[in-house]
Image (cartoon, coloured by chain):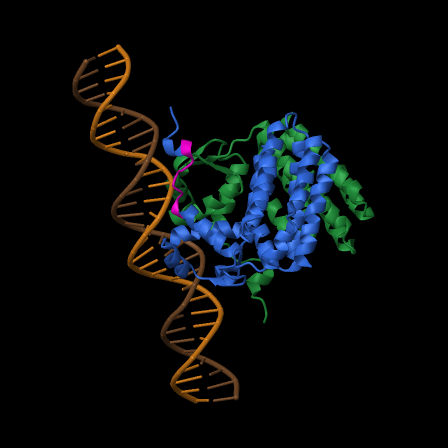
Chain colours: A blue, B green, C brown, D orange
Amino acid sequence: MAASAVTLLGLEKKSLREQALSALRTAITSGKLAPGRHLVESELSEMLQISRGTLREALRQLEQEGLLSAGPRGRLSVRNLDAKEIRDIYAVRAALESLAARTLCELPDRAHVIESLHEAIDAMDAALEGSLEDRVESDMEFHRSLCQLTGNETLLHSWNSLEGSIRMSIMFAGLEKGVSNMSVERHRDIVTAIETGDASLARKTIREHLDAAADNLVA
Amino acid sequence: MAASAVTLLGLEKKSLREQALSALRTAITSGKLAPGRHLVESELSEMLQISRGTLREALRQLEQEGLLSAGPRGRLSVRNLDAKEIRDIYAVRAALESLAARTLCELPDRAHVIESLHEAIDAMDAALEGSLEDRVESDMEFHRSLCQLTGNETLLHSWNSLEGSIRMSIMFAGLEKGVSNMSVERHRDIVTAIETGDASLARKTIREHLDAAADNLVA
DNA sequence: CGTGCGCCAACGGTTGACATTGGGCATCGA
DNA sequence: TCGATGCCCAATGTCAACCGTTGGCGCACG
């Protein structure tokens, strides 16, 4: 049986829940919904033009991603990060990406991996001409690729769950500070290390990169 | 302001959604809901005596925990793990717990941490007399404590999200195989390493423990 | 001035309904 | 007989309206 056209084209219209999820995630990580802001189900469901039930499913998901924090009686508000939490998030991030780097180094055939990573770096280069948001976007893309290319679904899933928190951290510190860590050179070093297959070097490179980023964010 | 009695006692009755979540999680990780089994909302909502809406919130959460996999048109079924996925899960697990070990080693005041870990080990000792399930339970408790005691909420959260998958891995391989890795001595070594504050030793110890466990599970 | 009472906002949960979509089965034609 | 056609149904996605509960808040009253 042939896959449907939409599936082949990757154009399947997302469910309302998924749309709401994306919309809310973007609103939060872009600061349109300020940290600490209390969310009211009825308000949101009206804004997004979806029913409360559908909305609640999306909210649960955002809660699990750590973008929302639950107060007493299920009261939800946009999570507010402090410096320690940002460091904590980046510590977990570093652990995951270290694993990614090590895994990639151990792959027998890394050719296509290296190629993909170079493409991601080219995209970052191109984004230098764009807005701050574009630069953040291409950076996230690169790091997500690291996890994705390992072929470890669980790793990718964990990273995706953390992505919202990472974006919040960057937003919290201010986009300017956030992008200041995203030197293309640094990322080239990471790819080079992976290319050589030196796992400990790759891990060290990426760890230092992320540690520096965290330091910079909370400075 | 005083916290309410129920809060103090930690006895707040869980919401129906949370109850359903626990019930389903247990049903899956205990094998009562066989891997690959297709789940029908209306059936489950009747079994659990809750409405479809509430059930769907719980299902979404289980999906994010990796216990359920979504087929076409939102069709949910109990996730089916193969050997590679188990290894992948344990690789992520090891990354998280390595971070936990390192973090604990770097804590200036580890006395209460060591104490808590010793209690967890005592519980494992006691569970030697109990059922296989008891032993698994006390083991999970120990490892969760590792993450919790770091004080890194994000780390604990990530571990919790992975816990379901870990339990599934153990169930998949058979409880006997699962518990065979849970030697109390091994765990004592981990605590000892943390006690000395030797981060690299602690990481090495826990990593070897988990690698061996994964090997054993898929063997 | 303080206290108690009642209103109201917001959440947890339910019910019943409807559209959509694909699978399965039976029917029909070559 | 076998494949194509088309209908029915199961299951999900979504909605609207509703109820009970619970705290917060403000007002009236002693």
Count of marks placed on residues: 0
The quadrant in which residue D8 appears is top left
**Left or right for A18, reference A156:** left
Q: Nearer the viewer, residue B44 or A23?
A: A23
Q: Residue at x 64, y 44 (%)?
A: A184
Q: Is residue B80 visible?
A: yes
Q: Is residue A212 above or below residue B42?
A: below
Q: Residue at x 72, y 34 (%)?
A: A199
Q: Is residue B163 visible?
A: no
Q: Is residue A14 magenta?
A: yes
Q: Is residue B165 magenta?
A: no
**Left or right for A150, reference A42:** right
The quadrant in which residue C4 appears is bottom left
Q: Give coordinates of residue B75: x percent, y percent.
A: 41, 36
Secondary structure mostly seen in the magenta stretch: loop
Q: Nearer the viewer, residue B21 or B110?
A: B110
The quadrant in which residue A146 appears is top right
Q: Quadrant of the N terminus of chain A?
A: top left
Q: Give coordinates of residue A64: x percent, y percent.
A: 53, 50
Q: Give coordinates of residue C10: x percent, y percent.
A: 43, 63
Q: Give coordinates of residue A78: x percent, y percent.
A: 52, 59
Residue at the far front: name it: A129
**Left or right for D9, reference A87:** left
Q: Is residue A143 above or below residue A175?
A: above
**Left or right for B206, reference A122:** right
Q: Residue at x 71, y 31 (%)?
A: A196
Q: Nearer the viewer, residue B169 or D6?
A: D6
Residue range corresponding to the magenta coloring: A8-16
